Image (cartoon, grey):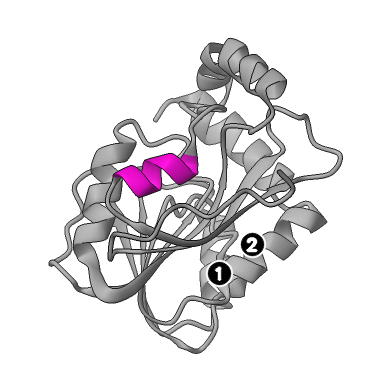
């Protein structure tokens, strides 16, 4: 990871994702985690305050270490059980098959290079009755906004360190073999339309459940 990503983009990302409306969505998703939990795309630890004592073990995974002092403070106040950090990629998870109860992904699937491989790995490490909890931005169901997302995506990848504006998160999850149980679409207020499309919900490693209809369609 380069100097721009570590010293400019990371602090800006950390600041921008602390807005009140997004914090409420984050709490809604992350507070559902329980048992042995894996978080992919740990970033700067903004999910840590929202884990509860129901989390027996928390494994935090990212491909880089960002804002270490800020992260250390957030880890100290986390209510989850034993915490372990792994610096690696989500495309090859160093975990055994069916070894976790829950995987948490918040604003991560947008930037993983091989997202299909990462989702296959997530499905592999989840127990049959486990859950993938999702809070992701992605492709709009408004065709006009989606066209702008496609146009701006090359620039977005540069300025936001590989982030994609236009990934259809619900379809990617379903194509990886997950049953999409409860995945709604919401829009952030006072955010650029190309960034405001949010997917919120959960998926099961057991296939066969069709993607949920988009709310507000």
Disc 1 packing (10 Å; few <14; some 14–19; many ≥20):
many
Q: In which quarter of the image is residue 193?
A: top right
Evaluate if marks 1 and 2 touch, with contact meaning CB atoms under 8 Å apart.
yes
Mark on residue 30?
1
Helix, strand or loop for disc 1: helix
Residue beneath the point at 49% across and 50% down: 43
Q: On the picture, is 201 further left or further right than 111?
A: right
Mark on residue 26?
2
Residue beneath the point at 81% across and 57% down: 20
Name above or below for residue 30 compared with residue 68: below
Q: Report the predominant secondary structure element of the magenta stretch.
A: helix
**Residue 160: image location, x then y, percent:** 56, 27
Helix, strand or loop for disc 2: helix
Image quadrant occupied by the N terminus: top left
Figure label count: 2
Residue beneath the point at 33% across and 31% down: 113
Q: On the picture, is 196 further left or further right than 170?
A: right
Asked whether residue 173 is drawn in magenta, I would say yes
Residue numbers of the magenta segment: 169-175
Q: Distance between the residues labelled 1 and 2?
A: 6 Å
Seen as rendered, the residue at the extreme left is 96
Mark on residue 110?
none
């Amino acid at each position: 990871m380069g100097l721009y990503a570590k010293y400019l983009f990371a602090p800006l990302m950390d600041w921008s994702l602390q807005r009140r409306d997004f914090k409420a969505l984050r709490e809604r998703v992350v507070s559902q985690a329980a048992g042995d939990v894996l978080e992919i795309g740990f970033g700067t630890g903004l999910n840590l305050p929202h884990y509860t004592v129901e989390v027996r073990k928390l494994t935090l995974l990212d491909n880089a270490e960002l804002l270490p002092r800020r992260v250390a403070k957030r880890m100290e106040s986390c209510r989850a059980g034993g915490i372990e950090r792994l610096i690696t990629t989500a495309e090859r998870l160093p975990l055994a098959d069916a070894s976790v109860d829950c995987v948490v992904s918040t604003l991560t699937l947008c930037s993983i290079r091989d997202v299909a491989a990462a989702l296959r790995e997530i499905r592999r490490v989840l127990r049959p009755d486990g859950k993938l909890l999702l809070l992701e931005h992605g492709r709009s169901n408004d065709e006009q906004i989606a066209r702008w997302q496609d146009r701006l995506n090359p620039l977005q990848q540069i300025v936001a360190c590989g982030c994609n504006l236009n990934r259809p998160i619900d379809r990617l999850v379903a194509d990886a073999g997950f049953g999409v149980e409860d995945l709604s679409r919401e829009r952030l207020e006072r955010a650029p339309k190309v960034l405001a499309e949010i997917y919120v919900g959960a998926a099961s490693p057991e296939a066969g459940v069709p993607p949920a209809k988009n709310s507000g369609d």
